[in-house]
Amino acid sequence: MGGVVTGVLAVAVFMYFPIAKKIENYSPAWFLGLLISINLFVGGWIISDPYFLRLPVVHRAWGEYMFAFGILMPIIHIRYRSAGKPREKGTFFKQRIRLKDGAESV
């Protein structure tokens, strides 16, 4: 059963890739994705805890899936959105301060 769930989640992630580039930051879809990932993370953490609810192992296994997917969803989204963009090498920050054309350094 775990292999089937893993396969379905992998297919869902690859189907999500074309949608990820269309989602703008701070849009309703962005907040919905953030809310879903937080709920998966917290719900999975609660369900998978062996001392809190004392659920059977089968239910705790589903909590582990929820917990892992709640962590991986934002990571996958952020990583895929920056996949096609060129990177600046040698800088720590996103942009460097550059001189304008024709300006002389002092």
Image (cartoon, rainbow, N blue to C red):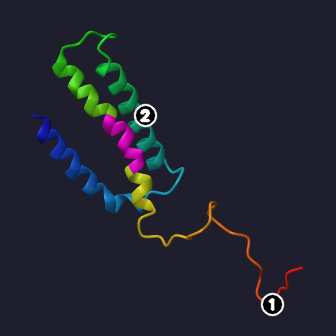
Q: Would residue 42 appear left or right of 24 to someone viewing this image?
A: left
User: Does residue 98 appear left or right of residue 61 in this picture?
Assistant: right
**Residue drawn where x is 27% and y is 29% of the image:** 64
The answer to whether residue 66 is above or below residue 30 is above
* Magenta residues, start to end: 68-75
* Magenta span contains residue 82: no
Mark 1 or 2: in front is 1
Residue drawn 16% across and 46% down? 7
Q: Quadrant of the C terminus?
A: bottom right
Q: Which residue is mark 2?
A: 38
User: Hey, which quadrant is residue 100 in on the image?
Assistant: bottom right
Q: Position of residue 59 (x, y in %)?
A: 20, 21
Amino acid type indicated by mark 1:
Gly
Look at the numbered disc 1 and give the secondary structure of its residue: loop
Residue situated in front as seen by the camera: 85 or 29 = 85
Residue 69 position in % (x across, y down): 32, 39
Q: Which residue is mark 1?
A: 102
Q: Residues within 10 Å of mark 1 (few under 14, many from 20)?
A: few
Taking 68 as reference, is 87 above or below it? below
